Image (cartoon, rainbow, N blue to C red):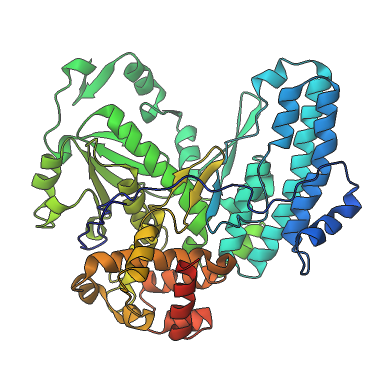
Amino acid sequence: MQACRQLTIVMLCVLVTATSRSDADESGGRLRATAPQPVAQAEALVDDARPSKADPLAVLDARWQVAVEPLARRAEAVDHEQLAAAVRGWRVRAVPPADGRQLIYRIPATSTTPAWVRAAKPPVQAVWEDFRAARHRWAGEVYQAAREAANAEQGCEAMRLLGVTLAADPDHEQAREAGGWVRRVEDGGTTWLWPEAARRQSRREVYSPEFGWLSKTWHDRYADGQRRAGTRWVSKDELPAPSKLTDAAIWQSDHWRISQLGDEAAAARLAARLEETHAVWWQAFGSFAMERGELERRFNGQFRARPSTSSMQAVQFASRQQYIDTLERLEPQIGRTLGIYWMPTQTSYFFEDDDVDATTVFHEAVHQLFAESRRTSRLAGEENGFWVLEAVACYMESLEATEQGWRLGGLDHGRAPMAVERLTLDGFYVPLETLSRLGRVDFQAHPQLPPLYSQISGLADFFMNAQQGRYREAFMTYLQRVYTGSARADSLAQLCGADFEQLDAEYRRHLSR
């Protein structure tokens, strides 16, 4: 494990990459049906797996396992092992993972049929269509569970289950509308876009991973190797490198406007990481952005998605030195950073460097998403609770890509292993009551700042994942209060329904697992 290095300033950047261990098993306690079972026996499967009262979500997963085996056997009956493996290997589940990590699903723009199915014989295609229909029915049941969570003001759980719904059925109309997407029909097929992307498409812009959103004319010229230089079009090789921000080229993604001072391909990579962060943040923290009652209105069909009036801002400098020379007037110690979200300018700043990994982008983009996704206070964390602003950004450093999407959190990932080491080997721990009273200045002036950063990373995992996410909803509400400037020093304990001493003890037990 690499030692942590950090310096805090307003909305400070991530300065360290933590090595991670291998991905945990993604089964999350899934139930496996070894032979066809009648649907009526689903509850019995759950009862066999759990001694206590059956969890409704476990019942849903058991029903799926009951339904999937006949489909797999039908695929085998038509001699198509690939289809049988695809049916049995489908890994979307309603029950959260049991390994203490969040599972975030990658949600495609629409449902698709693999080329190998389209090329297969009609009996194979029939099995595939029945498989899709089964997923559609199951997704509908998960959506109802998400709606119940929303009506109960359990925003984190509602957003998690909304992600499960759309991973199972990307064309689930109610779930898409509740999530804020906009439907578009292209070439006779349906696709779902974020409102900002839909607005650009309505203006006849096109998107490509290489160039971002551009007008059709500009995109074709870019593809031919031309670039805009003032009022002229020139060859890409003739384009002078911009030396100042006012001359920067613009790389536009769905949610970010990137001022590009360096390599175009590097800007494309940055845009992909920023949008990846947004996709994960939406499922893990999306309820943060919603005012009281908004989530319930979304699930009750009383919400209409509207595009943001402006994109979030980011800058990518061509070099570390250009980054330092430009920003040191804002922060004299900028040279000790690898990237920064600067709240006064509402902009994230990065630079091209092979030694700067994706965790820097994840950390800073999360700062930006929390600060700009709803009305927040410029004085967030000034009086108390500043630790949580940094903790949740450090938590995002644990992000790991998987075949299905991403895993987030866990004591073996990100900076959390250092939290375990600091507590168990060094005996370092600042009690939560003391920590929660610290505003920005006192937090940043703490004489043991590096181990404190390790601790808050562990605390973030505790509040997000301990005891099957027992405190996750309270933690999200606490984040809202700190960001809006309404938190008190004792808000976290009150929201959790536990005193600080109890939370300290539970945190210690969580880290000793």
Comparing 68 with 494, the one in front is 68
Indicate left or right for 331 with 170 as reference: left
Res. 325 in view: yes
Indicate left or right for 406 with 219 as reference: right
Residue 116: quarter of image: top right
Comparing 118 with 246, the one in front is 118
Residue 234: quarter of image: top left
Residue 66, how many percent across, how many down?
A: 83, 45
Res. 300 in view: no
Indicate left or right for 177 with 288 as reference: right
Q: How many marks?
A: 0
- The structure residue drawn at horizontal position 28% and vertical position 69%, both measured from the top left corner, is 452
- The structure residue drawn at horizontal position 15% and vertical position 37%, both measured from the top left corner, is 319
Residue 449: quarter of image: bottom left
The image shows residue 437, relative to residue 241, as above or below, that is below
Residue 377, how many percent across, how many down?
A: 33, 69
- Seen as rendered, the residue at the extreme front is 425
- The structure residue drawn at horizontal position 14% and vertical position 31%, both measured from the top left corner, is 242
Residue 150, how many percent across, how many down?
A: 64, 64
The image shows residue 453, relative to residue 326, as above or below, that is below
- The structure residue drawn at horizontal position 66% and vertical position 25%, both measured from the top left corner, is 188
Residue 157, how many percent across, how many down?
A: 60, 62
